[in-house]
Image (cartoon, grey):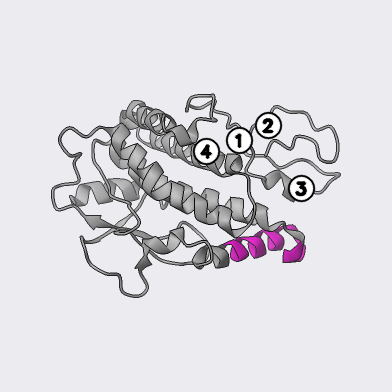
Amino acid sequence: MPQDMVGDLAGLGAFFAVDVHPAGAEPGAPWRPGRELAEPFGPLLGRTESVRAALAGRGGCPPGDIELRVAASVMHLGLTARLVSPALAALAGRGRLDLRLDGLWWQDTAGGPVPLSVPDPGGGGQPTAGRTAEDDCGQLVDEVLAPVTEAVSGLVPVSPRVLWGNVASAVNGAAGMVAAQRADLGQQAWAVAAAFFRSPKLGREHRPPGPSFRRSSCCLIYRLAPSAGPRAVCGDCVLRDVPRAGPGAGQAS
């Protein structure tokens, strides 16, 4: 893979940066095989508990006061954003990364974006002849994001609508970050985001990606707010424009 692609991705921020390893190689510590990310009771459980503890620390409450499904959703949102961001940015720049789990490496670090390493394609990371960005987006959804999402749903009951809304939010957020930092890639970044949204698995999203995107569900972080306090919602949350009507209101999950 050309060093300029690696450098360009790193320049967009930690969610986009990747390391590169020889295709077919097995990881050595501290790297771990990406297929672990599709194991429901593997490292994802520990990462969910870590997120739960971090959320509790910020809120000044015991971890048991944080619903496990909320922590699982927040963990999933961060992980899917990490997996989507470099792939989307590479495609926006007319390149290609292979993030399929059998060849992907990762590090189980605490806090911040998960370090990732991708196989070196050896051919410059350019799209295969006859292969479209939509093909690559569909492959990432089906072979990476779907197994990770299914693994998270196996940890604790979380609505698939919530989890796939997280994926849509991650795609939209990545495109927005590329467009904000690289105006020359902005149009293509939003086009790649639209290609992701054409996956049937994102069929619940009725609004196209863009700066005014609102997802069709909530990531559940609003449930961290005290019952009498302000409701915490993200910028693209379906609840942002819904007035609070009291305890239990706005449960669009």
| Residue where numbered disc 2 is placed | 240
Residue sitting at 57 percent across and 53 percent down? 153
The amino acid beneath tag 1 is Gly
Residue 169's disc is 4
Q: CA distance from mark 4 to mark 1?
A: 10 Å
Magenta stretch bounds? 48-64
The amino acid beneath tag 3 is Ala
| Residue where numbered disc 3 is placed | 225
Mark yes or no: residue 150 visible. yes
Mark yes or no: residue 85 visible. no
Q: CA distance from mark 3 to mark 4?
A: 21 Å
- Is residue 137 depicted above or below 33 in this figure? above
The amino acid beneath tag 4 is Ser
The amino acid beneath tag 2 is Arg
Quadrant placement of the C terminus: top right
- Under circle 4, the secondary element is helix
Question: 62 or 152: which is nearer to us?
Answer: 152
